[in-house]
Amino acid sequence: MAKRKNKPNPAMYGVDQQDAERAERIIEMCRGMDEKDLAKMANAATAIKLVRGLTDSLTA
């Protein structure tokens, strides 16, 4: 019998199911990374956030 993970209710944290699943995938992807790789991921996330913000401000 497979062990089932207890997952928190995304609504408790003010996120929808899609965002919760996305966060879970990112956590799994980062598991086992060293500090240098995690820094690269953080830099990429910051760049994506910046581009998204600029795009939103241009289309608003």
Image (cartoon, grey):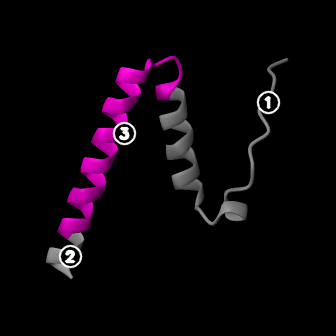
- Residues under numbered marks 1 and 3 in contact, where contact means CB atoms less than 8 Å apart: no
Relative to 52, is 5 above or below? Answer: above
Determine the residue positioned at 18% across, 67% down.
55
Quarter of the image with the N terminus in it:
top right
Q: CA distance from mark 2 to mark 1?
A: 42 Å
**Of 37 and 28, the residue lying toward us:** 37
Query: For mark 2, what is the residue?
Result: 57
Relative to 25, is 33 above or below? Answer: above
The picture quadrant where one finds residue 5 is top right
- Residues under numbered marks 3 and 2 in contact, where contact means CB atoms less than 8 Å apart: no
Q: Secondary structure at mark 1?
A: loop
Question: Which residue reaches farthest bottom?
Answer: 60
- At label 3, counting other C-alpha atoms closer than 10 Å, the crowd grade (few under 14, some 14-19, many 20 or more) is few
Q: Secondary structure at mark 2?
A: helix
Q: Which mark is residue 41?
A: none
Relative to 39, is 16 above or below? Answer: below
Q: Secondary structure at mark 3?
A: helix
**Of 3 and 51, the residue lying toward us:** 51
Determine the residue positioned at 79% across, 39% down.
6
On the image, the x and y values in percent for residue 7 come to 74, 43
Query: For mark 1, what is the residue?
Result: 4
Mark 2 or mark 1: whose residue is earlier in sequence: 1
Tell me which amino acid carries mark 1: Arg
Q: Is residue 60 magenta-colored?
A: no
On the image, the x and y values in percent for residue 33 come to 45, 19
Q: CA distance from mark 1 to mark 3?
A: 30 Å
Query: For mark 3, what is the residue?
Result: 42
Q: Is residue 43 magenta-colored?
A: yes
Q: Which residues are magenta?
A: 29-55
Determine the residue positioned at 67% across, 61% down.
13
Q: CA distance from mark 3 to mark 2?
A: 23 Å
